Image: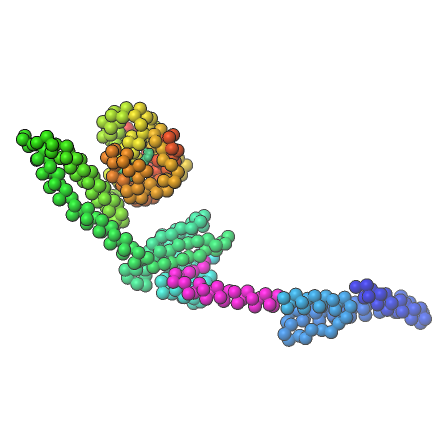
Amino acid sequence: MKRDLWKYATILLSASLLGYAVGATLLVTLFFAIAIIVWQLHRVNLIQQWLDNPKDNPMPEMGGLFYVLHKKLSKRNAQYGKRKRQLSAYLTQFRKAVSALPDAIVLIDAFGKIEWANGNAATLLGIRWPEDANVRFGDLIRYPEVESMLLDAQALSSSLEINSLAHNHQTINLKSVPYSKSTRMIIARDVSQLIKVNQIHTDFVANVSHELKTPLTVLKGYVEIIQSAKDLPTKFKKPLEQMHLQGTRMQFIVSDLLYLAKLEDKANLAPHTDVEVTHVINAIIEALQPLLENKRHKIELDIDHHARIRGAETELHSAFSNLIANAINYTEPNGKIHVRWAADSSGAIFSVRDNGLGIPPHHLSRLTQRFYRVDTDRSREGGGTGLGLAIVKHVLQRHNAELEINSAEGVGSTFACHFPDAQIVLVDQAQTG
Ligand code: ADP
């Protein structure tokens, strides 16, 4: 830079001396100054041409400031070229890896248009890349559920199952995962086999339970006949009582298992009506009255009579009854149970709070698994089958609702069922009662 300044200063000084000698100092100096500017512009132009197209335009030979600038730019250019090659190698490798995945991967933009798809997208979804570039995903996979999944931009990740358009009897699980501000990755997986295995498992449990029903009734019947015999030796009384008790327990388990199998069957949907939750709760409390009195619990009801659930009354009765019965069973005598039903900003909530035994936190996530109990003996003593909360979970799933459990050991528990707005009907005061 300094050298350049000296050079141009010297030229201009010499020009002014020359001008002075010929009697036109200003004119000659101006002429040389313009010549210097034109020369610099020419060099800038050469550099620009070289930057625009380095392959066709050779690197211009120059000195001074332009030489330094030129050197730095060439170095940057070389680094950029290397980085570009590296990135494109990574990209090719990444695309190869994604293509090798057994799942179909489709990248879509903010408008649901396809940006890229791997090879398996053609097999599982019939989406071909690059032919289907920029086509809307929803136009190729025409299901209303898919449309609403794509519209729900807020959802962190959502998933649904659809029947394959390409292959009959194939069930595809679609998962939509946002991976940048406006783009989403759709992952599709063939879950037909998994569903088949689950179905076999459900059918097996349902069949075994069904097969056990008749022998159990027969056994219990004979036990009752023997128990009623006048000449029954005293030593048989206790064993027969136990046989009767265990027979009854097995009947409860079988009936709960059959009910669960029914709930698991998505095709077997009970007709949905506007269920008056007030009536359901009253019926449950009436049925559980002997149990409540036996334990001398105080029960408080806080019920919003305007809110109804669009759902299956028998299923809701069974779920709510399980929650209230649990609160009664797992609370020491003279306890307090609070049953609440209220509409809220996101729908409505049914909750049962007790001041009973409470549940240690590490059990909470597993409570809705079949036969999972915190204290097996206590559950059996109270006539529990270990299936109550599994039934609650399934009923709620069938009503798009969610179960939230809060509990502290020795303090009590709250089981809350959150129903979404779409499942709630609010009626006028005049219609209630
Ligand atoms: P069970 O027939 O054993 O009651 P559930 O599925 O209804 O089966 O409940 C599973 C387990 O969760 C119970 O065995 C019990 O340990 C625990 N549990 C459920 N409700 C409560 C509650 N309100 N307070 C304390 N523990 C509870």
Foreground residue among 232 and 189: 232
Vertical placement of residue 382 versus 90, above or below: above
Q: Is residue 84 left or right of residue 310?
A: right
Residue 50 lies in the magenta stretch: no
State which quadrant residue 427 falls in: top left
Quadrant showing the N terminus: bottom right
Read off the magenta span: 80-108
- In x, y percent, where is residue 24? 91, 69
Q: Is residue 403 left or right of residue 242?
A: right
Q: Main secondary structure of the magenta part?
A: helix
- In x, y percent, where is residue 314? 24, 38
Residue 96 lies in the magenta stretch: yes
Q: Is residue 32 left or right of residue 233?
A: right
Which residue is found at the position 38% from the left and 33% from the top?
A: 409
Vertical placement of residue 173 versus 40, above or below: above
Foreground residue among 257 and 331: 331
Q: Is residue 391 left or right of residue 349?
A: left
Which residue is found at the position 34% from the left and 30% from the top?
A: 356
Q: Is residue 298 visible?
A: no
Give ligand 1's quarter of the image: top left
Which residue is found at the position 44% from the left and 49% from the top?
A: 156
- In x, y percent, where is residue 331? 31, 29
- In x, y percent, where is residue 296? 28, 24
Foreground residue among 25 and 43: 43
Which residue is found at the position 38% from the left and 62% from the top?
A: 102
